């Protein structure tokens, strides 16, 4: 359909923006983070077009294909529509959401608007095996490129990648890190603490 739009953002709202592409204004629903990240000049946003009733189409915009993939996973879950999925991504970045899914962190997922206990449980059950390594550690962490992550986020993601390199599954590593991630902001400490937590199970 429409893989991306490239043009100038002429209007910004709380949950949407208008993008002028060659004189045509497209209304694009997006997270506040995506909207604020759009530059004043020419901008590019990846898009997902969702069909509604009566031949009406909604356009959803994202900063990366990683976000689109997670958006599609969320909307594949019964009871989670596009607006709810966008609300989830507004509160939880892809990596935080992926970590919460594989570690069974219901409390974190329920921070998102419109997500109750039953929906959070269903979301984790249906998506646990669909979360990718890239969503857990981030495409930049995998490739070794520089990132804009905070040191704490870097430490958690690096520790997760290291544990998976040692042979632990995504779920095992993520679950252990979710228990100890607030105890240190150093990768080596998190690895040691996570290994200790797993040995005690």
Image (tube, grey):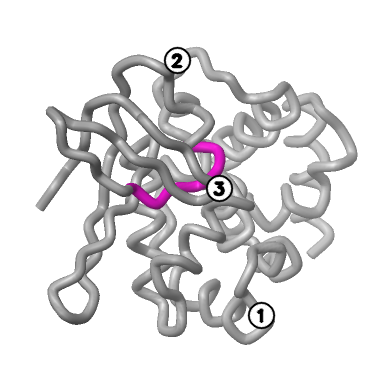
Residue 128 seen: no
Q: Secondary structure at mark 2?
A: loop
* Relative image position of residue 59 (x, y in whole percent): 28, 54
- Does 77 sit left or right of 179 as displayed? left
Taking depth in this image into account, of 160 and 136 the one nearest to the observer is 136
Pointer 3 residue: 14
Residue 172 visible in this rendered orientation of the protein: yes
- Which numbered disc covers residue 116? 1
- The CA distance from mark 2 to mark 1 is 37 Å
Determine whether 186 is above or below 90 in the image. Answer: above
Magenta extent:
28-34
Q: Earlier in the sequence, mark 3 or mark 1?
A: 3
Distance between mark 3 and mark 2 Cα atoms: 32 Å
Task: Residue 110: say if magenta.
Answer: no
Q: Quadrant of residue 112?
A: bottom right
Image x and y of residue 188, in percent: 76, 26
Drawn side of residue 115 relative to residue 78, left or right: right
């Amino acid at each position: 359909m429409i893989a991306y739009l490239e043009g100038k953002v002429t209007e910004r709202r709380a949950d949407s923006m208008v993008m002028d592409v060659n004189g045509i204004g497209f209304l694009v629903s997006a997270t506040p983070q995506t909207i604020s990240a759009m530059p004043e000049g020419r901008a590019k946003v990846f898009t997902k077009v969702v069909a509604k009733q009566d031949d009406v189409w909604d356009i959803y915009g994202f900063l990366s294909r990683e976000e689109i993939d997670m958006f599609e996973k969320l909307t594949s879950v019964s009871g989670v529509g596009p607006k709810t999925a966008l609300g989830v991504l507004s509160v939880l970045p892809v990596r935080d959401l992926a970590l919460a899914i594989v570690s069974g962190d219901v409390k974190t997922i329920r921070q998102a608007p419109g997500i109750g206990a039953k929906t959070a449980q269903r979301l984790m059950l249906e998506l646990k095996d669909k979360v990718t390594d890239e969503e857990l550690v981030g495409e930049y962490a995998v490739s070794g490129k520089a990132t804009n992550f905070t040191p704490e986020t870097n430490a958690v993601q690096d520790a997760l990648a290291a544990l998976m390199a040692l042979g632990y599954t995504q779920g095992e590593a993520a679950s252990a890190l979710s228990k100890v991630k607030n105890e240190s902001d150093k990768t080596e400490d998190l690895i040691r603490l996570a290994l200790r937590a797993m040995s005690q199970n």
